Image (spheres, helix red, strand yellow):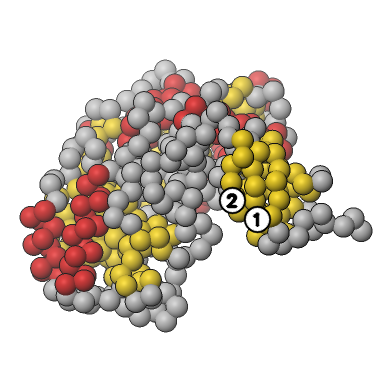
Amino acid sequence: MQKVPVIKNQEYELGIDNLGMNGEGIGRIEGFTMFVPGALPGEKIRIKAVKVGKSYGYGKLLEVIKPSDQRVNPRCEHAGRCGGCQLQHMSYSLQLEFKKQLVKDAMERIGGLENILIHDTIGMKSPWAYRNKMQFPVGSIKGKLAIGFYAPRSHNIIDMDSCIIQHSINDKIIRVVRKFMKEFNIKPYDEIVHKGIVRHIVSRVGLASGEVMTIIVTNGEALPHGDRLVKRLRKQIPGIVSIVQNINPDKTNVILGNRNIVLWGKDHIVEYIGDLKFKISPLSFFQVNPVQTAVLYYKAVEYANLTGSEDIIDAYCGIGTISLFMARKAKKVYGIEVVPQAIEDAKFNVLENNLYNAEFIEGQAEDVLPKLVDEGLKVDVAVVDPPRKGCDPRLLDALVHAQPKRIVYVSCNPATLARDLKYLSDRGYNVQEVQPVDMFPQTAHVECIVQIKRAESRMK
């Protein structure tokens, strides 16, 4: 057995050649691979080996001896310690290149798909303060209240007063809730002993509408002095129209529970994407970057190549955002979603936008789609926008059985996307092109939209 040339807790110098899937630098010590968060290709660095395995290890960046010309100073004081961002030390142009390469590598290594047209990543003019949704865990550090993001690969909260990738109104919400909890001695949740009151602070902001929702996630129904908090939020948060208490008593990492109590105002906010209006409830999915969402959805319509005569299936439709974009140029759209509240919002959105050729069905897409096909529906175009785990295998089977001419696949995870594309490619579908969209600047995440067509031989 070859001896590992790296010893844990020892310091080393090495050069960085490439980037890993999470944006960490990759270098080698006597052929032994080391992953180093915060390092960039072309740099010479000094590290401390913090984890050493049989074939690779991880190093802590101690010093950049020779910096890359793509290195920039992070804007946030918490960069490197906070798990919210991974790429603030990287120029934005390099971030976009990295994300395109991330997609390309996944297509080739996982999907076995080579020579696929992968476009340059579509970036933002201003890649800051873009998130319309905040989800801050609440806990304690040495007995003191802590509100912020988790540190990488842990549930240790990095306490912070502001986050520069969030909408600025979120910082004000955090300050109001922090002061309230301290003043009235409201205990934060302790996930180890499952005690305490406030678990998370969640907010949604309508960038176009200006409407704001604040959600206080609690470990049970108790929220002492909740009326005081409502009064302060109403007075100090511009645009607030909804204050909700979400009840989550379960021992889980899932942020939101299934039960909501409206403390004041509406049970939703509204937001616009382009000229379409959408109702968004606490449990409904909505993309976190409204500027790039419009880019993504217009590209989805382009890839669907609609003539006005198509019947469309939109699996994982959420509140019907993509469905309604498609409905303006299609004959009929059937949206399928398992979350009841999202379906309620989707039906409301149909009425708000006068697009009555969209129909929404509650249920698992892998169950509903085969039934629709058995009842005689001929699917011309299918749209899928699954969670990070990708499509359920039964849904992929149902798609192949339905035989749509075109599939538009929206994904936030290149790895599961590539896996699913391989499945479809092996069953008579051709991947035409992939468009990465930078939905999450300063992070290692990337959104993709893919145009897929049924092979000509299958259309006869």
Up/down of 87 relative to 408, above or below: below
Give the total of numbered labels.
2
Labelled pair 2, 1 in contact (Cβ < 8 Å): yes
Q: Nearer the viewer, residue 38 or 194?
A: 38
Point out residue 26 in the picture as x, y percentages from the top left corner: 67, 42
The amino acid beneath tag 1 is Lys
Q: Residue at x 59, y 50 (%)?
A: 61
Residue nearer the viewer, 444 or 454: 444
Disc number placed over residue 62 in the picture, else none: 2
Q: Quadrant of the N terminus?
A: bottom right
Q: Is residue 1 visible?
A: yes
Image quadrant in which the C terminus is located? top right
Q: Is residue 432 left or right of residue 17?
A: left
Residue 123 horizontal/vertical position (percent): 44, 28
Compared to residue 23, the image places residue 6 above or below, namely below
**Residue depicted at x 65% and y 47%:** 46
